[in-house]
Every structure is written in C-alpha cells, then in structure tokens.
Amino acid sequence: MRWGIRAALVVGLLLLALYPKVATGYGIQFMLQLFMWVALAQSWNLISGLTGYVSFGHVAFFGTGAYAAGILITRHGWHWVTGSLMGGVAAVILALVIGYPCLRLKGPYFAIAMLGLNEVMRVLVSYFEGLTGGGSGLSLPTLHASREIYYAMGMTAVGVTGLAYLIFTSRVGLRFMTIREDEIAAEAMGINTARYKLYAFLLSAFAPGVVGGLYARDQGYIEPISVFPLLTTITMIVMALFGGKGTIWGPVLGAVALFVLQELVWARFLYLHQILFGAIIVVVVLLMPKGILGILQDRYRLPRTV
Amino acid sequence: MRDGDLLEIRDLTKRFGGVVAVNRCSLALAPGKIYGLIGPNGSGKTTLFNCITGLERRDAGEIFFRGKRIDGLRPHQVAACGIGRTFQIIRVFPELTALENLLVVTREPFEVAHRRAQELLRFVTLDRLQNEYGGNLSYGQQKLLEFIRVLMRDPELILLDEPAAGVNRTLLNELLAAITRLRDQGKTILIVEHDMKVVMGLCERIFVLDYGEKIAEGPPAAIQGDARVVEAYFGR
C-alpha cells in the first residue's frame, strides 16, 4: 500500500516532468497555473489549516513577491529564477514585520487585519510610481520561457507539498496544531505559541512570494490590481477547504479539482463560473467543512497524513 | 520567604472590573506535600491558578517559585519553570490522538517521549485508545488524559483544578492513589476540589478562599471545625 502510493507519486512526477516534450502552449500554461494554485492553496494550509489562524490576505505575499521579482528583473537585470527566489524572501520579510503584531489578534480580527494588509500593499505599490510604475504597471523584458517557468512552478508546488509532509509528520507540526486546537492549553503546557505561530506564518509566506515572481515573469506585465486581487485569496482558501484543510493532500486535491472545473466551465460560460464558485463555497462551508479528505478520513478512520 | 518553600504567593490581588477576584492573598507551599484549595463558587480559586500559571496578569502582589519571581512571565515560561496544571473545563487537544496529546508537550527525544507516553497511558488504562482522537474520548477519559499530559513534562508543582469531577469511583480511587504516589516521589500538588471527602482524605494542608480572601488555613481537621469556613459555606 505504502509502496504503491510512493510508486504512483514517482510515476506521476515523471509524467509531469516529461509533459512539456509533448505539450501544446495551452497545455503548458494550464499546468503552470495549476501548479501555482497548488502552491498557493498549500501555503495557505500551512498557516490556516495548521494553526487555525485564517489568513484573508495571503495574496499580499503573492503580490509582494511579484513586485520584488519584477523590480529586480527589470531595474537591476536579475535572472528571473533568482529574482523569484528573492520575491519569496521579500514575502517572508513582510510576514515577519506584520506577523509580529497581527498574530496577537485572534479569530476574525486576524482575518480582517490580513485583509487590510493586502489593501495597504496594493495602495503602497500604486503610490511609489518611481519604483513600481504605479497604476500603469510594470512591464518585464520580453522572454519566452514558458517551459522553464513550468518547471520552476512545478518544483515550487512539489516543494511546498513536501514541506507540508515534513511538518505534518513531525512533532513541530503537532505543536502548530495545538494552537488551532486550544491555544491556552498549549501555552499552559509549555508551548511558546507566539513563536510557533510566527514560524508557521513565515513558512506559509515564502512560496506565495516565489510563485508571485514566477507569475510576473510568465505574464510579462504586472499591475497592482492584477497581483493583489482579493479573489486570489478567496480562491486559494476555497481550494484548501474543498480538498480538506489541515491535511497534506487536501489542498492539492482541491486545487486540481477546482482549477480543472473552473477551466471547463469558464471556457463555455464566461460569467457562470463565478456563480459556480460561489455555490461551491456555500456547499463546502455548510455541508462539508472538513473537505473531501476530511470526510474520507472520518469515514474510513484514516490517519491525518493520508 | 521561608527557606525551602517551593511556591510563595505574597499579597496577590486580581480584579475584573469592579470584582476583586483575589484579594491580598498570601500562601506558601513546602515541597513534597499535597495541598487543598477550597471555597464556595466564585471565591477565586481558578483565578488564583490562572495568576500562578501566567494566564492572568496579577494587579498586585508577588509570586515566587523556587525563590524566583514568576509573576509577569508568559504561561509557557511558567510551565518551563516546572509548574504543570489541568483545567476545570477539559482542554485536551480534540483533533490530536491521545498519544499525540502527550508527545506534543515534551521536547525529549522521540523514543524517550514515546516510551514515557506509553507508560502513562497504561497507567490510566487508556493504552488501547492511544490512537483515538482526544475529542472522541469520554469526559472521564479526557480528564485522565489531561492529568497524564501534565505528568509528561515531569513538573515539580502540579496544580489540579477539580480532578475528581466526572470521574467514576473506580477510576477516582486510582487517580487519588496516583496523586499520593506523585507526592511520595517528592512532587508538590495543589488541588482545587469540591468533593470534601477527596479533599479531606488527600490533603495535608488546606487553604480556604471566600470572596478572594484567604479566610483559613490548616490541616483538614482544623478546617472542618473552623467557624469562618462553616459560615462561608452554609451562611450564619
């Protein structure tokens, strides 16, 4: 069983690695975006699924990474790979600065503070025109590197999921979970909850920053509205919830299922897909708050790591 | 401070708005004894626990543990000093298994922690439920799990907030035996409990709170005959 799953994983990864050899341009773009959503949903899972601190502004890290990478690439001539990695670093620095005060807030107050952060970041980026191009956006030098970006996105998605696996199967992961379960009891049992919350937050900020940088490179043009949209936060939350927050494979499953669905519906009915998305949120929250994997785990008494 | 006291509380005061929950309360615990803390509902017992463990900030007064000031420390720092507690309202981690509930609170190497957790689970006969989620256990079982979770960290001072409530007679006797054994190992235990049979049978010295003030202190026999205690419980 264990070996079967591992073998399937290896085969799956190999197929994904070979896919660009045969893929069309559309296929590459589709998979690249799928990887992006897996990385985003999984990152959100690292803070919100594990510690229960619901971040409603995770796209702030995405946008910060996009702008950090965009500026380094256009103004300082950095390679897009190192630029995107620095995008991740910039996102982590932002998380460090705002995590310290914001993680003291509980429940809805934290969610709202994060929502506000995203608005602040968008306005800041619009304001410093000299650096960011302001409202008219930032154009990156032309580059045809879809295949390379495909691999970079893919590795980021695999990397975050691997990180999630390591965390979920370790005692550090359990300590993160005690914050969600009962923060006061965790403190009384000697767990430094403030520190662990910050760790989880920093870990959850890195990949969105990297992915933001790769997105900027892939699109070739970014503007405040395109990299700080609330809809992106909502989408990653819905994906994680749909698949099962607080599980390793839930966010992957949710991202794949919803992104494929969205693409199918979107291609046929331009406006209907937003209605559908809204309907899915309602159904998930009302009927299956633990997501698909959560339900399966309850029914078949599977461990959390499956 | 008397030499050798493990915990000393001096003139501790805690207010909530206009309510003085703990009022200039002083007490000292010598190591290796079982102490009781009793009083009518709302007399400040749990608030006193919360002040000791750092969950509430005191308004005035000082708390010393092994001669070191601990008021003002964060709860996890107090825990790291060697103080463990249980809660009146159960606080096990519901979506962690019984075993994980224990493993998560120590920093010992995994093998050591695992062996210790197994021993403790067997000790309260929860070993066959070790992979069950904490939230799926019965009330009494959760109470026991919370009790052994405190022991995982091997604290010097153990604060138990109503350990007997909701635990059946057979288990209760085992629990009381376990508490006595801990005392014999040199641990100090402070118990809040409403079951007078338990308190009088177990504790060597009892503190009585009423409206946040310590109104009496002494061995069980003296407390039972104390006029102020009788008045606090039954009225004049």
Image: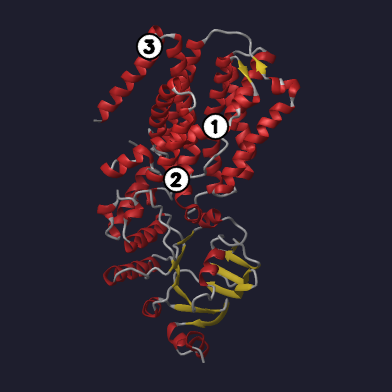
Task: Report the disc number at residue A231.
Answer: 1
The answer to which of marks 2 and 1 sits earlier in the sequence is: 2
Element at badge 2?
helix
Q: Is residue A137 left or right of residue A9?
A: right
Question: Alpha carbon of mark 3 to alpha carbon of mark 2: how far?
Answer: 37 Å
Considering every residue shown, the one lying at the far right of the view is A130
Q: Quadrant of residue A216?
A: top right
- Pick the front one: B61 or A83: A83
The answer to which of marks 3 and 1 sits earlier in the sequence is: 3
The amino acid on which the numbered mark 2 sits, given as a three-letter code, is: Met
Q: Is residue A16 left or right of residue A275?
A: left
Q: Identify the image quadrant of the N terminus of chain B.
A: bottom right
Q: Residue at x 65, y 72 (%)?
A: B18
The answer to which of marks 3 and 2 sits earlier in the sequence is: 3
Q: Which residue is mark 3?
A: A18
**Residue B157, position as x, y percentages in the image:** 47, 64
The amino acid on which the numbered mark 1 sits, given as a three-letter code, is: Leu
Question: Alpha carbon of mark 3 to alpha carbon of mark 1: how far?
Answer: 32 Å
**Residue A303, position as x, y percentages in the image:** 31, 41
> Label 3 is found on which chain of the structure?
A
Between circles 2 and 1, the one closer to the viewer is: 1
Q: Residue at x 46, y 28 (%)?
A: A273
Q: Which residue is mark 2?
A: A177
Q: Quadrant of residue A24?
A: top left
> Label 1 is found on which chain of the structure?
A
